[in-house]
Amino acid sequence: MPASPRKAGDSPGTEAEYDNYARHGKGEQPGIGSLNKKENSFSLYPNPTNGNFIVKANGRGKLTLCNQLGQKIAEYRTAEGETQLSLPQGMSSGIYIGRYVSDKDGSIETMRLLYNP
């Protein structure tokens, strides 16, 4: 039985077809780069931190810090531009997970924060 013809937009079948497909932009194969094309609206520095850090954001939002067990350690409201913040007293040194949610569009960004007092 002969193979059925592919329609426009179908994925390429052979290596040569894939090379042509990729080279001439006949659609985009999703990959890490293509999934993360949006501009970062949030950054945090210095990282590692001694306990004091700055959040730079394109708008207002909320930053939640959790330990590696997923337990909430702290929650902060951030303003547009730069916001100076401090970690809670008594935290152990280590890696914490930050989750920033933008008030503007609800976008979520995650990052790791290394605390080294």
Image (tube, grey):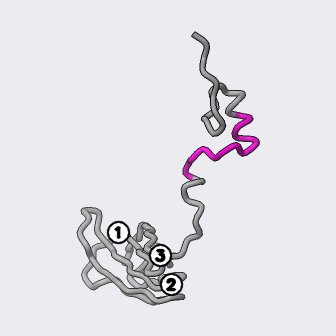
Extreme-top residue of the structure:
1
SS of the residue at dot 1? strand
Q: Residue placed at 30% from the left, 70% from the top?
A: 66
Which residue has dot 1 on it?
96
Asked if the residues shown at circle 3 and circle 2 are in contact, with their CB atoms under 8 angstroms apart, the answer is no
Q: Does residue 27 appear to the left or right of 52 in the view shown?
A: right
Which residue has dot 2 on it?
59
Which quadrant holds residue 51? bottom left
Q: Mark 3, residues whose alpha carbon is within 10 Å: few (<14), some, or many (≥20)?
A: few
Q: CA distance from mark 1 to mark 3?
A: 25 Å
- In depth, the one of 81 and 44 nearer the eye is 81
Q: Which residues are magenta?
A: 19-32
Asked if the residues shown at circle 1 and circle 3 are in contact, with their CB atoms under 8 angstroms apart, the answer is no
SS of the residue at dot 3? loop
Q: Amino acid at mark 1?
A: Tyr
Q: Position of residue 89 (x, y in %)?
A: 27, 85
Q: Residue placed at 33% from the left, 74% from the top?
A: 65
Give the mark nearer the N terminus: 2 vs 1.
Answer: 2
- In depth, the one of 40 and 90 nearer the eye is 40
Q: Residue placed at 48% from the left, 84% from the top?
A: 54
**Numbered badge on residue 105:** 3
Judged by depth in the image, the label closer to the viewer, 2 or 1, is 2
